[in-house]
Structures are given as C-alpha cells and as structure tokens.
Image (cartoon, rainbow, N blue to C red):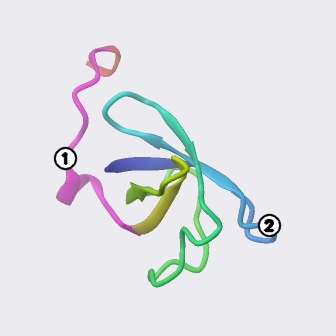
Amino acid sequence: MQGVIKSYDPVTRDGSVVRDTDLAEFDLAGDALDGSIFRMLRQGQRVLFQLDGDGRATALRLGSEVDMGMPDIPSLR
C-alpha cells in the first residue's frame, strides 16, 4: 500500500499513516521500521507499507510521488 505519514514520535515510535486510495488511517506497528532504511519519519513523508494481522502499518519502505504516482482523489482535482 501507499500512504503518507500523519504523525510520528521517535521516542515512543508511535505514529500513524494515511493510505492514499481511501484516506484510511492506520497506527504504526512497533516493528514498522525494522529492516528498513528509516531511522526517523517526518509528517508528510510518502511511504509504502503493509498491514500486520492487527491492522497496523508495518514494513515501511521508501516511497515518492515519482515512483508511486498520485492517488485519484476527486477532492484534489
């Protein structure tokens, strides 16, 4: 999935991501950054992610508008 970081606290590692396709918000799993190049996240950063069994965002990877494209959201036209 593709999304944008809504919030992230580097001390607690709590945060959330908003999915591009439907603007659904998901909490970050505790292991969301394990094995990734990320050490920190910033608000508005574009990422690729998966959902774990509890519906939390995990396996964050680098994303950008160029390689992911822009979502087709009518309100943004």
- Mark 2: few/some/many CA within 10 Å (<14, 14-19, 20+): few
Q: Quadrant of the rendered structure where residue 11 is? A: bottom right
Q: Which region of the structure is painted magenta?
A: 61-74
Q: Which residue is mark 2?
A: 12
Mark 1 in CB contact with mark 2 (< 8 angstroms)? no
3 drawn magenta: no
Image coordinates for residue 41, horizontal then vertical, percent? 58, 65
Q: Is residue 73 above or below residue 42?
A: above
Residue 70, above or below 31: above
Taking the image as shown, residue 37 lies to the left or right of residue 7, namely: left
Q: Secondary structure at mark 2?
A: loop
Q: Which mark is residue 69?
A: 1
Q: Quadrant of residue 42?
A: bottom right
Q: Position of residue 70 (x, y in %)?
A: 23, 40
Amino acid type of disc 2? Thr
- Residue 53 in the image: above or below residue 77: below
Element under disc 1 = loop
Quarter of the image where the C terminus is located: top left
Q: Tell me if residue 32 can be seen.
A: yes
Observer-side mark, 1 or 2, equals: 2
Q: Amino acid at mark 1?
A: Gly
Q: Tell me if residue 7 can be seen.
A: no
Residue occupying image coordinates x 39% and y 58%:
49
Residue 65 lies within the magenta run: yes
